[in-house]
Amino acid sequence: MKNLIYLTILLVSIFQASAQNKTFNIVDFGAKTGLNIINTRNIQNAINAASKNGGKVIIPDGQFVTGPIEIKSGVELYLAAGAELLGSVNRLDYGKKNAEALISAKKQHSIAINGTGMINGRGREVVKNLLSLLHEGVLEDETWKVKRPSESNRPRLIAFTDCEDVSVKNVKLKNSAGWVQDFVRCNNVNIDSITVESTEYWNNDGIDIVNSKNVRITNCNVDAADDGICLKSEGMLGICENVYLENCIIRSSASGFKLGTGSYGGFRNIKVRNITVYNTYRSAIALEAVDGGFIEDVDIEGVVAKYTGNAIFIRLGHRNKTDKYSTIKNIRIANVKADIPNTKPDAGYPIEGPLPKVPPHNLLPASIVGIPGHLIENVLLQNIEITYGGGASKQIANIPISELDKVTENEAGYPEFSMFGELPAWGFYVRHATGITFKNVKLNYKESDFRPAVIFDDVKGIDVDGLKVDKSEHPNVMVLKNTSGVSIKNTKFPSNKKESIKELP
C-alpha cells in the first residue's frame, strides 16, 4: 500500500513538472507582429491557458504591441532573443482613471518574467497621447497644468502587488511612463541580471520595493530618470524587511540607492554589497525617515560613486502631521570611494535633476542630520574616501562657525541633500545624533574651500579614529558644538593648523 502511495505521489509530481514546463507561444493564440496591431487579448489568452497547470508563455522574435496584461500564478512570461514587447501608445488602453500597468499581478504566486528580450513601455509616446487627451477634456488630471501629469495617470511597466515567489531575470526594461517596476507587499522577490533604461520621462524609478520582504536584487544595471533602486514604506502600513542588494550599477537623475522618501512603516535588515553609482544628480546613498517610520539594521559595504551630487545622506525628519516621530539607528556604511564634482553631475542626460529651489549654496558635504530631541543613533562610517571638487566662495554663501544655529532645521521639508541650503562644512556635517563613529575616513578637495572639513553639532558619543584631511583653508579642520563623549585619535590633519579641532559651547 505504501509503495502505491509513493508511486501515485511520484506520478503526480512528474505530471505537474511536465505541465509547468509546457510552453504557450503567443503566435499560436493569434498574436502578430506590427506596430499597428494590438495583441492584448491574444497574449492574455496565452497567459490564461498557461495558468491552468503552470507553464511558460513565449514572446518570440519580433515586435508585439500590447495593452495591459495580467500574469497569473504559475506562469513565466519569457521573452526570446530578439523579442520586443511594446506598450500601446494609446493612453485610453490603460483605463480612463488610474492607469493600469503594462504588466501586472495581484495576489498571485510563483510568477516570473525572464528571457533576453525587451519590454518597452514607449513612455514618451504614451505621455504625448495623454497630454492630447487632457487638452481635449477626454481625461482629467489635477497636476498636469502646473507641473506634469500625475503618476497615477501614467502607466508603470511592471506592478506586482501582494504576490509570493516572484522572479524577474535577464530582460531589458525600457522607457516607462512612470515607475519602471513596483513590487508592493510581495514576499520572496528575486530580481537578477536585468537592464533598466528609462530616461524619457519623469518619475521613472528603476526598481521600487514597497513594504516587501525577503527580496534579492543582484547583477542589475539601472539607468533611470528618478531614483535608481528605491525602497519605500507607504500606502497600507507595512515594512521593507530582509532586502539584499549586490553587484549593481546605477545611474539616476535623483538618488542611486535610497530608503524613503515614503517612510510610514519602516525598513529593517537591509544589506547592500558592491554597487557603483555614476553621473547621479542627488546622493549615491540616501537613508530617509520622515513620515513616522523607522530605519534600523542597515549594512552597506562596497560603494563606488563617480560624479555624483552627494556621497551619503542620512536624514531623520518630521514630515507627517501626527505626533509620531521617525527613528534611525544601527547603520553601517563601509568601503566607500566617492567623487563629488563642483559641476552638475547628470548634465546632458535626457532627463536631468531639477535646478535647485533653495538659495545659492556651495558644494554640499555628506551629512547625517536628525531634528532637535530626535537623534539619529549608532552610525558607523568605516573606510570612507570622498574627494570634492571644491571651489567654494563666501560670495555665494557663508555660515561662519560662530553662527551654526543659522542652519535651518527644515523638519518637514522634502528630504534631499540640498534641503538645508548652505552648510558650514565641506566634508561631513553631523547634527542631532548620538553614537557616531568615523573609522579611517579620508576627505579631500581639488579646488579651495574656506569651510571646516567636519562639523559635529548636538552630537553625543563621537568616536573618530583615523580621520585624514589632506587640505584645510579654515583655521579649524573639525568643529565640535554642544557635544559630549568625544574620542578623537590617530588623526592626520594639515601640519600648519595650530587649532585644528575647535570646541564650541
Image (cartoon, rainbow, N blue to C red):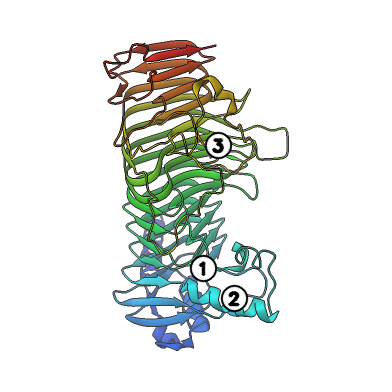
The local secondary structure at tag 3 comes to loop
Give the answer, above or below, for where 120 lies relative to 487. below
**Label 3 is placed on what type of residue?**
Phe
Give the answer, above or below, for where 41 lies relative to 195. below
Residue 32 x, y percent position in the rendering: 41, 88
CA separation in Å, label 1 and label 3: 31 Å
Residue 317 x, y percent position in the rendering: 60, 35
User: In this orientation, which residue lies closer to the viewer: 189 or 320?
Assistant: 320
Is residue 118 something one can see in this rendering?
Answer: yes
Q: Residue at x 65, y 40 (%)?
A: 319
**Residue corresponding to mark 1:** 177
**Residue corresponding to mark 2:** 130
Q: Residues within 10 Å of mark 2 (few under 14, many from 20)?
A: many
Front label number (2 vs 3) = 3
Pointer 2 and pointer 1: residues touching (CB < 8 Å)? yes
* Occupied quadrant, residue 332: top left
Q: Residue at x 51, y 58 (%)?
A: 182
**Residue corresponding to mark 3:** 420
- Residue closest to the far front: 395
Q: Counting residues from the N terminus, which is met first, the one under dot 1 or under dot 3?
A: 1
